Image (spheres, rainbow, N blue to C red):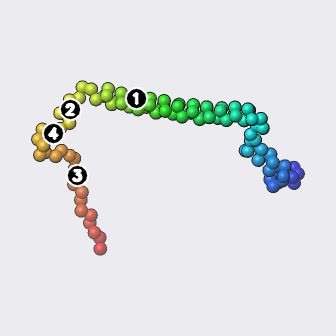
Amino acid sequence: MTAQTFRFHSHQFQSRVRSAFEPRKPRHRLLRFAVGLVGLALIVLLVMFGVVVGAAMLIAGLAYKLWHGRGKPIAAHRAADPRVVDGEYRVVEKPAIDR
């Protein structure tokens, strides 16, 4: 292994890394326009896919709620006497203070 192997500050290494992460635009006008249209079409496609998936999730959730809500009477959720409060409780012991 040579001493040049791990030197990342060399001009050659920096130019290769820069060209990998900063692709150049095509020089021809029509080709540049076509690449822009492809990018715009990709963005529109992804947005529409997201809208369709979101709408499908909302519809599935509403259908699930409607389907599981059938057969249950609405009055079953109410108490017979409006003055009665139904609930569960437990007695909490008073902590002993050690002095």
Q: Which residue is mark 4?
A: 79
Residue visible at 22% across and 54% down in the picture? 91
Image coords of residue 99 (percent x, y): 29, 74
Residue visible at 81% across and 55% down in the picture? 9
Q: Amino acid at mark 1?
A: Ala
For the residue carrying disc 3, how many other residues have a C-alpha within 10 Å: few (<14), some (14-19), or many (20+)?
A: few
Name the residue furthest right: 2
Query: SS class of the residue under badge 3?
Result: loop
Q: Which residue is mark 1?
A: 60
| Disc nearer the start of the sequence (2/1) | 1
> How far is mark 2 from mark 1, CA to CA?
23 Å
Of badges 3 and 1, the one in the foreground is 1
| Disc nearer the start of the sequence (3/2) | 2
Q: Amino acid at mark 2?
A: Ile
67 or 99: nearer the eye? 67
> How far is mark 3 from mark 2, CA to CA?
30 Å
Left or right: 46 as drawn, with respect to 56: right
Residue visible at 49% across and 33% down in the picture? 51
Of badges 4 and 2, the one in the foreground is 2
Mark linked to residue 90: 3
Image coords of residue 88 (percent x, y): 22, 47
Of badges 3 and 4, the one in the foreground is 4
Query: SS class of the residue under badge 2?
Result: helix
| Disc nearer the start of the sequence (3/1) | 1
| Disc nearer the start of the sequence (4/2) | 2
> How far is mark 4 from mark 2, CA to CA?
11 Å
Asked if 22 appears above or below 7 in the picture, the reply is above
Q: Amino acid at mark 3?
A: Arg
Q: Which residue is mark 2?
A: 74
